[in-house]
Image: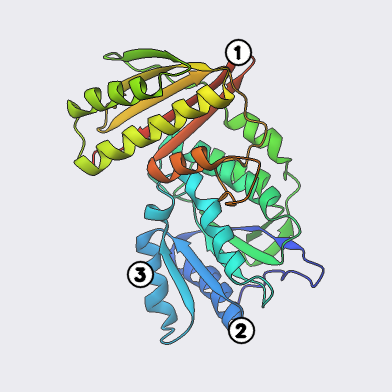
Amino acid sequence: MMNVSAPTASGDFVHPALFYQGRAEYLAGVGGFVREALAADEPVLVAVPGAHLDALRESLDLSGAEVTWTDMTQLGRNPGRILSALQDFADRHAGGRPPRIVGEPIWPGRSRAEVLEATRHEALINSAFAGRHATILCPYDVLGLPAAVVSDARRTHPTVIAEGKDLLSPEYSDASAVCADCDEPLPEPDGGVRRFAYASGELGEVRAYTETWARKADLSTARRGDLILAVSEAAANSLAHGGGSGSLRLWSAAGGGVVAEVRDGGHLADPLQGRRRPSLTSAQGGRGLWMIHQLCDLVEIRASESGLTLRMHIACS
């Protein structure tokens, strides 16, 4: 059985990466983690890709056990949605036994943009859960993932588990350094881009422009509504926090779906903004960006001296 350091009574947060090779090692490592949690009567959330979810359920045979199962390909389709879901689970069990979570945000087949945002998520977990009494185990397929992804896992996790050994990671880095490396330049679209500049008092015009463009795009009715709402929230943030004006670009994605990009003169002071659920009474804001993460399939944010770029991806259906 795998030995993962448990959080102490003082509220230590434990965040190891599990490096596995093949299905047998995966089931032994993750399955052992789940069994340990259940034996200690600790609440468990397992958020892994669907195929792994099915294999774990079959191998563990935990009829009647209180395990929350979540398909990460749905929850983590946009990596920016994962953190708030993990925090929601931990909050529901605050004051009781410390929760144990399995979170697998990166799997073979993820696009480069998705991997960058998932890596950013892994780095920010350490800040978001600092001081909390919880453990989050993150499996990494060392045979199926690029070496650079495995290397980044050593930077985003204080400890790594490989070949049954739980060791400190000498490559572990501050979240700000990892996030800076994730800020690769956004690729320019090939063509077919529509542009619209807006200023104070023109939020209705932004919405109308987006709705007109979206009617001609290859989107279901529901996804068209998601696009219009996401762009409206982004433009509202521009007018309130981004200097009072901004520019919108819209184009069809090469692999299907659409992309909307908003640029303005704003700044993102808190890298966790939008990734954790905002309080109804919070004065710190972030509700618009959090909603954008819930609506979109991928959200990319880039900051520069001149302002902020928010790129939102919406799939066809």
Q: Secondary structure at mark 2?
A: loop
Q: Secondary structure at mark 3?
A: helix
Q: Which residue is mark 3?
A: 54
Q: Tell me the quarter of the picture where residue 52 sits.
A: bottom left
- Disc number at residue 168? none
Sort mark 3 into few (<14), some (14-19) or many (20+) by Cα contacts within 10 Å: few
Q: Which percent across, then down, holds residue 283?
A: 66, 43
Asked if residue 138 shows in the view, the reply is no
Q: Residue at 62% x, 71% y: name it.
A: 99
C-alpha gap between disc 3 and disc 2: 23 Å
Q: Which residue is mark 2?
A: 41
Q: Which residue is mark 1?
A: 306
Could you tell which of marks 3 and 1 lies nearer the N-terminus?
A: 3
Q: Which percent across, then down, holds residue 27?
A: 47, 70
Q: Looking at the image, which is closer to me, 279 or 266? A: 279
For the image, the number of numbered tags is 3
Q: Is residue 201 left or right of residue 18?
A: left
Could you tell which of marks 2 and 1 lies nearer the N-terminus?
A: 2
Q: Which percent across, then down, holds residue 9?
A: 80, 73
C-alpha gap between disc 2 and disc 1: 51 Å
Q: In the rendered image, which quarter contains the N terminus?
A: bottom right
261, above or below 8, in the image: above
Residue type marked 3 = Asp
Could you tell which of marks 3 and 2 lies nearer the N-terminus?
A: 2
